[in-house]
Amino acid sequence: MPFIETTPTPAHVVVPFLIRNGIHGESYGVELAADWQPFDWWRVSGVYAYLQLNLTRVEDAVSSHILIISASEKAWLPAMLSGLGEASVLTVSDMEHFTERGGMISLRLVGQKVRFDINLDATERAGLKLSSQLLRLARAIYGNGPLRE
């Protein structure tokens, strides 16, 4: 819930919100490397790496306000978005074609400026309303097909 804070002055409204990446997990691993040179003219090298990831599901993100999905999570995107269902969670990513795949706000670097696209269908399904000022700043807006590009 928003609340008013008086220090430091001037008095201001604080609106707390929680941001998560949607995936929790633990990782374990080992890496072994061997280098053996039995003769000046013969060298044997070998490397072995093992990594185990134990990831939990995205359901914990339902209690967040904003879910930031890294482009490296592309393989899990369909599961993450379907796991959110119709929860009122704003999804934001720098992933290519994020809005076309069901995400809400896609960030991209154009020149030296950050631009964004918006998927109105996704925001409406989640019960989120975006301000007209934000929509005016968007590079492209998608709804039932592209509304503006």
Image (cartoon, rainbow, N blue to C red):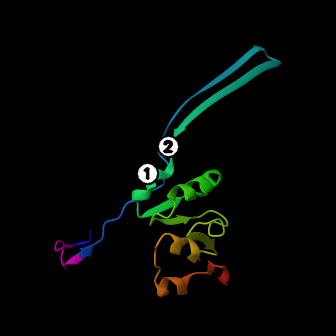
Q: Quadrant of residue 35?
A: top right
Residue 91 is tagged as none
The answer to whether 40 is drawn above or below residue 111 in the figure is above
| Position in image of residue 80 (x %, y %) | 56, 55
For the residues bearing labels 1 and 2, Cβ distance under 8 angstroms: yes
Q: What residue sits 56% from the left and 59% below the top?
A: 81
Residue 85 visible in the shown view: yes
Q: Quick one: 48 or 66, which is closer to the camera?
A: 66
Residue 115 visible in the shown view: no
Q: Quick one: 119 or 96, which is closer to the camera?
A: 119
Q: CA distance from mark 1 to mark 2?
A: 9 Å
Residue at the disc numbered 2: 56
Secondary structure found at label 2: loop
The magenta region covers 4-12
Secondary structure found at label 1: helix
- Quadrant where the C terminus sits is bottom right
Residue at the disc numbered 1: 60
| Position in image of residue 56 (x %, y %) | 49, 43
The amino acid type found where label 1 is placed reads Asp
The amino acid type found where label 2 is placed reads Thr
Residue 18 lies left or right of residue 28; in this view the side is left
